[in-house]
Amino acid sequence: MTTIAKSFRELPEYSQVLANLVLRDLKVKYQSRGLGFAWSLLHPAALLLIWYTVFHRTGLMRATMHNYWAYLLSGMLVFQFISSAIIDGSWSIRRNAGIVRKVYLPLEILVIAAVTVKFVEFLFQLVVALVLLAFLHTADTGASFSVLKTIIVLPAALILSYLLALGLALPLAAWCVIYRDLDHLVGLALTALIYLTPVFWATGMINLNDYALLVALNPIADLLALFQGPMYWGTWPTNPAVGGNATNTWFIAIGFVALIFTAGWLLFTHSKRFLAEVV
Amino acid sequence: MIAPLEALTQQMIPGLRCRVPAIECVKVWKQYYFHQHRPRKIKDALFEMIGGRARDARDAVWALQSFSLTVYPGETVGVVGHNGSGKSTLLKLLSKIIQPTTGHVHISGRLSALIELGAGFCEDLTAKENVYLAASFLGFNKRDVDQMYPGIVDFSELSDHMETPVKYFSSGMQARLGFSIAINVNPDILLIDEILAVGDADFQPKCKAAIKNFQHQGKAILFVSHDLSAVHDLCTRVIWMKEGKIAADGPPAQTLDTYLEHYWPGCTAHKSFAKLAS
């Protein structure tokens, strides 16, 4: 317990380090490329185009959804953020081995920085998505973008996604230092996970059969409901996988995040002592 | 070995004993496992779990064994010893990068360390950005660094290259920059690892002068080097480390002669630091 107390006491002193690391990553990533920050938009735009073509234009999805692109958009950015934050975060300590071996810093900072960089990109993408949805995803009846509900729900939903990504990335970052082949598995697991998450399909629109429990236990799926509700359906968040009413939806999402974040932090604190020796 | 030295320094600087030690290691043991030094696979973990095989005690190596050292402000302690004698482990323990298996390490004051030449540079950033990053590791915010920056650039003599990414720097230039940062952040304790090995003819005397200046300010320095004559010139006390223990501790000439005599018997008959001093 003392190590955890120490870690919380120490972190504020390293806020300048965090700022520098985040700026470093953004700079290194975007200054060397002609299009700069636009690249962070091009990637999801290309994915959206591919998925829209594959799942909608070809008729692969039998159930048709009004403005299918808007549905994809309201879920994919969150999933992409969490997934890329986990991948970058779990690699963050290894990537900064040069720093870890030579100076002391609380190693959480490196993971927090990696997740924050992805979060900044996510926010940027989200702003563009919100503008698109507000202008193009409108309808008199049925699903449409709700400005008011989005403004109310989004801050909490964003905080929860950030904490979830961090809670998952922290222990993985430590284990990736100890087990050198873990990062392959992480990538693979995330590739599989997107099919268990209602990004392409909507819960309630297809028959989940035996997979219903898996979807309900997928914390990312529970978070996605918070975004898709106001951004696509125009309703308060409701997650059919956990019964559908608003209380359940929030309770499950917050519960999962609290559990994963606490467990992730504890697991990281438990193993961080040895990381500088092994990295 | 420590007692007579302390008595001597106390004669010169009365009241020294009352001062708080800058560095204090008390019975520090540090154990490494050999398998920690090679990458592990999940496969290994699974085998260990299934086979129930715990970490093998034979794989363990003690890098420091009941190591105790007290350094007071004003002392410059040289550390000599062969590769693998625990010198770098000591520096890493002092800078909190690693933690002792048992025993405790106490540091009082701001500590600035140069371990394996670098200061934790990020290759893709420019030298200027790296100065700000490295200083933030030591707890300085942007405004503090703005004030220190001219001094750092001046000392390193790299003013033409501050906008160049560090990856294009030679190892000597990186060492210059690292040393300039370490010395200009005004630490109370300075840990230096082999800094003089890469600097060129101009920079070496400058480093030595900076270290001397640091000594006059009454700060503590731990100086690891294989350059024995530099150790002799700069240090007020030298320890010889062997297999994770202190094999000798005392005035520079005395420890260095013991060290040399142990590995090259008879050599001090020709070249002795004690004779050199007198």
Image (spheres, coloured by chain):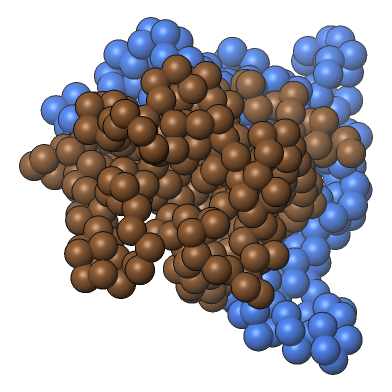
Q: Residue at x 42, y 8 (%)?
A: B143
Identify which residue, A149 or A38, lies in the foreground: A149
Q: Is residue B28 visible?
A: yes
Instruction: Check the image and report above or below for B278 versus B57.
Output: above
Percent x, y of residue B58: 83, 83
Percent x, y of residue A17: 50, 28
**Please, which residue is most extreme toward the front here?**
A141
Q: Residue at x 64, y 16 (%)?
A: B218
Percent x, y of residue B154: 27, 19
**What colour denotes chain A?**
brown
* Left or right of B239 in this view: A201: left
* Left or right of B1 in this view: A218: left
**What colour denotes chain B?**
blue
Instruction: Check the image and report above or below for A22 versus B102.
Output: above
Identify which residue, A33 or A93, lies in the foreground: A33
Percent x, y of residue B244: 77, 61
Q: Residue at x 67, y 34 (%)?
A: A246
Q: Is residue A116 visible?
A: no
Quadrant where the C terminus of chain A lies?
Answer: bottom right
Q: Residue at x 39, y 59 (%)?
A: A200
